[in-house]
Amino acid sequence: MTWREGLPRPRGRLLFDEPLAPLTWLRAGGRAEVLFLPADEDDLAGMLAALPVEVPVTVLGVGSNLIVRDGGVDGLVVRLGGRAFGEIEVEPEVSRVVAGAAVLDAALARAAAAAGVGGLEFYAGIPGTVGGALTMNAGCYGGETGDWLVVAWGVDRAGQRRVFTLADFAYGYRHSQVSPDILWTGAVFQGRPGKQLDIEASMAAITRRRETTQPIREKTGGSTFKNPPGHSAWRLVDEAGWRGKAWGGAMFSPLHANFLINTGQATAADLEDLGEAVRADVQSKFGVTLEWEIKRIGRRQ
Ligand SMILES: Cc1cc2nc3c(=O)[nH]c(=O)nc-3n(C[C@H](O)[C@H](O)[C@H](O)COP(=O)(O)OP(=O)(O)OC[C@H]3O[C@@H](n4cnc5c(N)ncnc54)[C@H](O)[C@@H]3O)c2cc1C
């Protein structure tokens, strides 16, 4: 019996050989050996506890910072969704927001604003989920997850529930020190009292700015590379001559030179190989190492 045949029957859904491209912003890449959509945290914990230890586990948010390689992802791929992971509760009297890991960052920002909770409006500019934000220390326009997080919880690879306070994350730039084995299921954010109209005006300004500076209607993965200390990644890509240059179906956006886009039929290999070509070129021209911000998962073909 294979590990797939021995899986317990969850209350959520199990899908075999499921294409992952539709679950990513870049719309490229292969299949999940098994895709699991848990019904709730108990369902997730039960599955992980029953899963043989040698089976790898990968968790997806909405794939807004992700390349799934063309050979697909071995093992169990978990995607959180539905009511159990999508709830938002705002406590206006203490300016706190409790959110499930599948809540979209922009929905969190809107719910906080509607209740007069400020500070979290930067999330209006990030198209990921709370789970992705916890892992990536997502941020923009002067705010980032580590500035506002109080506590987060999730389930580890063995199916045990775990709780982490902000200090445990030891956040750096788009990086957390918590083991990647944790699958986040929820978090609490501490905002500050504000006026709904002011907060909404600042969210609208963030949205306008993004629309004119980022290719947000393209198939993209957001910032491809982290900004190296003392440099802007987009400027290095641009000055090395890669802005708007086609590579198979992949390209660095003419609008924002650090945004990798799929211009139509890119494979994940087109996207990753273009990124690697740019890294090598920037290294040789300017002596600067570009580090991927986009996470790359799975096997090449
Ligand atoms: C147009 C565009 C603009 C963007 N602008 C910004 C920006 O301004 N600032 C910014 O920081 N980012 C930006 N991004 C990148 C992206 O939105 C963020 O990194 C976001 O936090 C990723 O969330 P996600 O849910 O899409 O995660 P995914 O892309 O699905 O996954 C990213 C990582 O998070 C992990 N992860 C996801 N969910 C969980 C979970 N529940 N538990 C454990 N790990 C999890 C995944 O395993 C993976 O390692 C942008 C992306 C796009 C497409």
Image (spheres, rainbow, N blue to C red):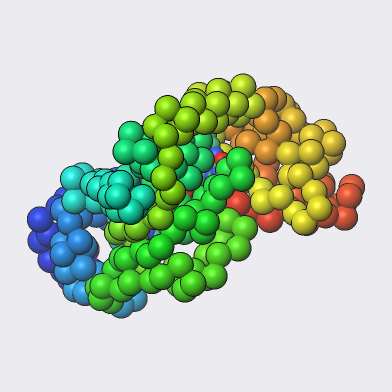
Q: Residue drawn at (69%, 25%), measured in percent from left and top?
A: 254
Q: Residue drawn at (71%, 33%), measured in percent from left and top?
A: 257
Q: Position of residue 29 (x, y in %)?
A: 46, 43
Q: Position of residue 10 (x, y in %)?
A: 12, 59
Q: Position of residue 235 (x, y in %)?
A: 79, 38
Q: Residue drawn at (32%, 38%), measured in percent from left and top?
A: 115
Whether residue 270 is visible, yes or no, is no
Q: Residue drawn at (10%, 61%), measured in percent from left and top?
A: 9
Instruction: Using residue 298 as the reference point, say whether residue 74 is left or right of it.
Output: left
Instruction: Using residue 43 as the reference point, say whether residue 178 is left or right of it.
Output: right
Of residues 37 and 301, the one nearer the viewer is 37
Quarter of the figure that contains the N terminus = bottom left
Whether residue 148 is visible, yes or no, is yes
Instruction: Using residue 52 as the reference point, say whether residue 194 is left or right of it.
Output: right
Of residues 23 and 192, the one nearer the viewer is 192
Total number of numbered discs in the rendering: 0
On screen, residue 36 above or below 208: below
On screen, residue 281 above or below 111: below
Of residues 289 and 270, the one nearer the viewer is 289
Q: Position of residue 163 (x, y in %)?
A: 33, 72
Of residues 65 and 165, the one nearer the viewer is 165
Instruction: Using residue 118 as the reference point, say whether residue 242 is left or right of it.
Output: right
